[in-house]
């Protein structure tokens, strides 16, 4: 495979992972909120659903193995080595904690508010990416971070009257700070995953990325399963399903759909990190929060403020700024490469 074909393939996979991230990022919070507003109350169970769909990853892994097997009979079933396995398992436990913090916040806050708080994750990701993986910032990426952060601040000015009916002030603010903690922790997890890729000491392929994702989700699910056992969630779930406002069948439909959408989110996030960077993954997550808010306003009739329109505009502006900078950077590297190939030693010319 020549360089151009490889670069084109990488771009295609990057776009696919961006789409997976977009679907999961917008759909995950909405379906999770639906679970809570229609009678669901199990926070540990809801956090479990964020990674409980990990067996889905076995499907593309099996397809990948079958293709390798058709080419070489001695093809390995898995590529992951013990060093990466342990690192992925550790990150998985941190992800389980992050899932619980986020689920708690979503159980107490409107989607539009929780999306606003999660948007601050970009600042944490930028800081940790600089510290852990020496992420290089351009004027365009800095501009994107600033614009997206300002958008979050604009939305933050309107949260005072956003408390759901029947919820105490204390519950609201506990949910607020739990969501903020989830944003900070995930802002640390994304660069940590990127650092794992950089220090892997083995060839990185997309199949290996999926294996890493499966290990992370597996250990995250174990973490949440322990929480469910302590909280007696397994005994309560059948009764909760029967009492669910939308009916028992739709309860389980919501549960399954939640697991699928969150798996799209996590697989897309680590895929974008693999083909680009943790900063781009965070920016995509951030730029989509106005879309999530708009959908919440449409489906859940949450309050709309003019500030949300301003934040949407700033998010799009920041997103365009980042990609414009990336395009300029790619063109500059291409031009520099062309110049280098033209500077051939005259003594080598026959």
Image (tube, rainbow, N blue to C red):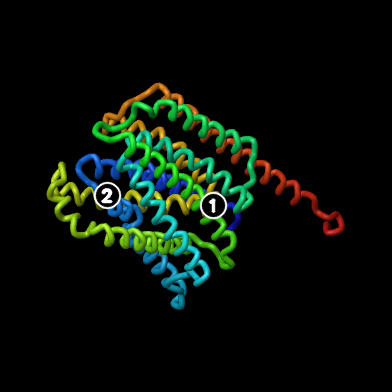
Left or right: 28, with 329 as reference point = left
Outermost residue to the right: 347
SS label for mark 2: helix
Is 188 placed above or below 245 here? below
Could you tell me which quadrant the C terminus lies in?
bottom right
The count of marks equals 2
**122 vs 346, nearest the viewer:** 122
Res 312 visible:
no
Q: Residue at x 30, y 53 (%)?
A: 44
Check contact, mark 1 vs mark 2: CB within 8 A. no
The residue wearing badge 1 is 191
Q: Residues within 10 Å of mark 2 (few under 14, many from 20)?
A: some
User: In the image, which disc is placed on residue 204?
Assistant: none
Q: State left or right for residue 219 relative to residue 38.
A: right
Q: Is residue 333 left or right of residue 20?
A: right
Q: Which residue is at 52% across, 69% downward?
A: 83
Q: Is residue 172 above or below residue 133?
A: above
Residue 214: image x %, image y %? 40, 62
Give me the residue at 39% from left, 69% from top: 66
Q: Residue furthest bottom?
A: 74
| Between 255 and 55, the one nearer to me in the picture | 255
- Foreground of the two, 208 or 223: 223
Q: CA distance from mark 1 to mark 2?
A: 28 Å
**N-term-proximal mark, 1 vs 2:** 1
Image location of residue 307, percent across then percent down: 42, 24
When asked about the image quadrant of residue 118, the answer is top left
Residue 257, labelled with which disc?
Answer: 2
Q: Is residue 224 above or below residue 333?
A: below
Image: 65 above or below 109: below
């Amino acid at each position: 495979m020549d360089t151009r074909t490889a670069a084109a393939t990488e771009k295609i996979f990057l776009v696919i992972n961006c789409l997976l991230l977009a679907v999961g990022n917008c759909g995950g919070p909405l379906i999770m909120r639906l679970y809570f507003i229609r009678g669901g109350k199990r926070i540990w169970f809801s956090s479990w659903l964020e990674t409980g769909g990990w067996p889905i990853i076995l499907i593309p892994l099996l397809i990948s193995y079958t293709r390798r097997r058709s080419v070489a009979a001695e093809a390995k079933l898995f590529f992951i080595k013990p060093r990466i396995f342990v690192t992925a398992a550790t990150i998985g436990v941190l992800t389980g904690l992050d899932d619980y913090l986020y689920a708690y916040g979503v159980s107490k806050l409107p989607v539009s508010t929780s999306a606003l708080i999660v948007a601050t994750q970009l600042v944490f990701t930028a800081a940790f990416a600089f510290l852990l993986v020496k992420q290089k910032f351009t004027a365009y990426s800095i501009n994107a971070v600033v614009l997206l952060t300002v958008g979050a601040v604009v939305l933050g000015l309107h949260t005072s009257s956003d408390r759901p009916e029947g919820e105490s002030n204390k519950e609201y603010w506990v949910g607020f700070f739990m969501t903020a903690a989830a944003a900070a922790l995930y802002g640390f997890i994304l660069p940590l995953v990127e650092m794992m890729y950089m220090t892997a000491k083995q060839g990185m392929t997309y199949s290996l990325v999926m294996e890493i994702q499966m290990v992370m989700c597996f250990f995250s699910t174990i973490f949440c399963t322990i929480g469910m056992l302590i909280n007696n969630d397994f005994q309560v779930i059948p009764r909760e399903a029967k009492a669910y406002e939308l009916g028992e069948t739709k309860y389980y439909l919501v549960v399954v759909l939640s697991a699928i959408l969150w798996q799209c989110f996590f697989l897309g996030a680590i895929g974008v990190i693999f083909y680009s960077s943790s900063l781009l993954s965070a920016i995509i997550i951030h730029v989509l929060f106005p879309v999530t808010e708009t959908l919440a306003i449409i489906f859940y009739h949450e309050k709309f403020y003019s500030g949300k329109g301003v934040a949407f505009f700033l998010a799009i502006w920041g997103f365009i700024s980042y990609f414009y900078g990336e395009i300029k950077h790619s063109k500059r590297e291409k031009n520099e490469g062309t110049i280098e190939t033209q500077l051939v030693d005259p003594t080598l010319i026959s």
